[in-house]
């Protein structure tokens, strides 16, 4: 069945419907396309924190803003594995690794991230990464290491984006999303509300997503977390009604994607979050920290799930577990991998040791 094409104006009409009707319409669409009593839960882990060269106006990790974020180097593999096991035991089906990078570089740090991806995939959790811009080849390497999803947000409309970020363009973001898609990795891409944008900007961003050949499988809707020291520190927090409108509108115009109720939940009441689930939110980030800012306690989230009769979704409910490609089991770029040019070559000393071991056993 072909999908409906939505113009920005049509989406705005949906967004501006009387709220009581919008809630009903979105809840109806949600139930026609999804299991409304199941919510997917992801844990976020900042694997490389702060010191980012970009100027995203909302971000506490940009080096040029003076926030309280302490820079941290890439985490160790054992730390990441411990966090993966912890996330799994607390009910998450996905671990999302975030790095304060402009883009991925083909260096030893990327090799290390590939190791992290393999390790988490082995633990039986879906693995998501958000590492900035990626080339098609890098996205393929992540896929071959067992990556399930990649997060890269458009953040706002193309027009308003320019007010928020100057160090890379909307086109760059679209290109990364395309590269992820070509690598066969599930796309997670959404935006932030509360940055001073208009309802038209929010709907224009949704029109871009709805118009994609394949819209993102996951669409995070973040409410700005206004962090002291960033250019957006004085933004008035969005009301819960705006969040409900945004989630409901996303639900109606992109019915098959999973809408993620993302940053900003510490400011929301249980009842407000319940409305978000009602109108179409099908996933959340759990754990007491997002990347650098606070998030509700996971026990509190599970209590709310229990009140609402929601169960956390099992991993791989919406897609198969990625297979690790044998060719990429080594850290090195296959094209640069050194070939053993003397396979028949033997070293006498080693042969003697082998013989000695045989005699002893
Ligand atoms: N550096 C990578 C990038 O920009 O793609 C990955 C990490 S970045 C922190 C991921 C996303 O987090 C951003 O695109 C933005 O949508 C969201 N984000 C960052 N700071 C935020 C804030 N203060 N409030 C809400 N969302 C935020
Ligand atoms: C997304 O859309 N929201 C998450 C995730 N993708 C990476 C990040 C929210 C970050 C909020 C600010 C912080 O904690 O630093
Ligand atoms: Fe850097 Fe990502 Fe923050 Fe932008 S959002 S400053 S790219 S960490």
Image: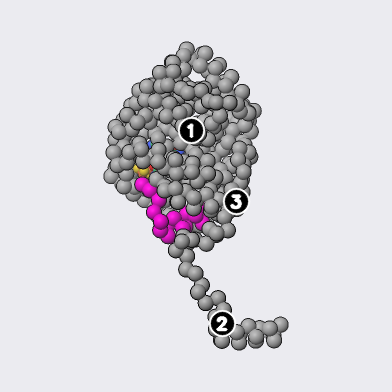
Q: Say whether residue 146 is left or right of residue 263.
A: right
Residue 12 is situated, as x and y percent measured from the top left of the image, at 42, 18
Q: Say whether residue 68 is left or right of residue 148.
A: left
Closer to the chain start, of discs 3 and 2, is 3
Q: Residue at x 44, y 55 (%)?
A: 110
Which image quadrant: the N terminus? top right
Q: Which residues are magenta?
A: 100-117
Query: How many callouts does the rendering have?
Result: 3
Q: Residues within 10 Å of mark 3 (few under 14, many from 20)?
A: some
Q: Give yes or no for residue 78 being in the magenta stretch.
A: no
Closer to the chain start, of discs 1 and 3, is 1
Q: CA distance from mark 1 to mark 2?
A: 56 Å
Q: CA distance from mark 3 to mark 2?
A: 35 Å
Tell me the number on the disc at residue 213. 1
Q: In the orientation shown, which residue stands out farthest toward the right?
A: 361
- Closer to the camera: disc 3 or disc 2? 2
Residue 223 in sight: no
Q: Residues within 10 Å of mark 2 (few under 14, many from 20)?
A: few
Find disc 3 in the rendering and name its residue. Answer: 323
Find disc 2 in the rendering and name its residue. Answer: 346
Residue 249 is situated, as x and y percent measured from the top left of the image, at 48, 22
- Closer to the camera: disc 1 or disc 2? 1
Q: Indicate whether 201 appears above or below 179.
A: above
Q: Say whether residue 346 is left or right of residue 245.
A: right
Q: CA distance from mark 1 to mark 3?
A: 25 Å
């Amino acid at each position: 069945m072909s999908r409906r094409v939505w113009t920005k104006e049509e989406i705005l009409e949906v967004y501006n419907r009387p709220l009581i009707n919008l809630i009903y319409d979105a809840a109806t669409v949600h139930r026609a396309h999804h299991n409304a009593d199941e919510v997917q839960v992801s844990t976020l882990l900042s694997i490389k924190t702060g010191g980012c060269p970009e100027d995203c106006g909302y971000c506490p990790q940009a080096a040029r803003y003076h926030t309280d974020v302490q820079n941290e180097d890439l985490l160790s593999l054992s730390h990441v594995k411990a966090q993966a096991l912890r996330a799994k035991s607390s009910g998450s089906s996905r671990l999302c690794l975030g790095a304060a990078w402009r883009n991925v570089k083909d260096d030893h740090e990327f090799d290390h991230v590939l190791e992290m991806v393999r390790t988490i995939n082995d633990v039986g959790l879906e693995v998501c990464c958000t590492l900035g811009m990626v080339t098609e080849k890098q996205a393929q390497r992540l896929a071959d290491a067992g990556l399930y999803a990649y997060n890269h947000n458009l953040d706002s409309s193309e027009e308003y984006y320019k007010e928020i970020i100057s160090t890379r363009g909307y086109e760059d973001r679209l290109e990364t999303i395309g590269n992820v898609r070509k690598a066969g990795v599930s796309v997670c891409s959404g935006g932030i509300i509360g940055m001073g944008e208009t309802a038209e900007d929010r709907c224009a961003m949704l029109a871009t997503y709805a118009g994609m050949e394949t819209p993102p499988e996951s669409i995070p809707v973040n409410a700005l977390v206004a962090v002291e020291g960033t250019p957006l520190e004085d933004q008035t927090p969005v009301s819960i009604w705006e969040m409900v409108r945004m989630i409901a509108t996303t639900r109606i115009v992109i019915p098959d994607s999973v809408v993620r109720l993302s940053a900003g939940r510490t400011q929301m009441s249980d009842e407000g979050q319940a409305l978000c689930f009602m109108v179409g939110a099908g996933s959340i980030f759990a754990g007491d920290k997002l990347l650098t800012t606070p998030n509700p306690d996971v026990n509190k989230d599970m209590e709310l799930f229990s009140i609402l009769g929601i169960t956390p979704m099992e991993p791989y409910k919406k897609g198969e577990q990625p297979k690790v490609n044998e060719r990429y089991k080594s850290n090195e770029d296959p094209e640069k991998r050194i070939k053993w040019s003397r396979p028949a070559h033997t070293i006498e000393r080693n042969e003697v040791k082998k013989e000695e071991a045989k005699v002893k056993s």
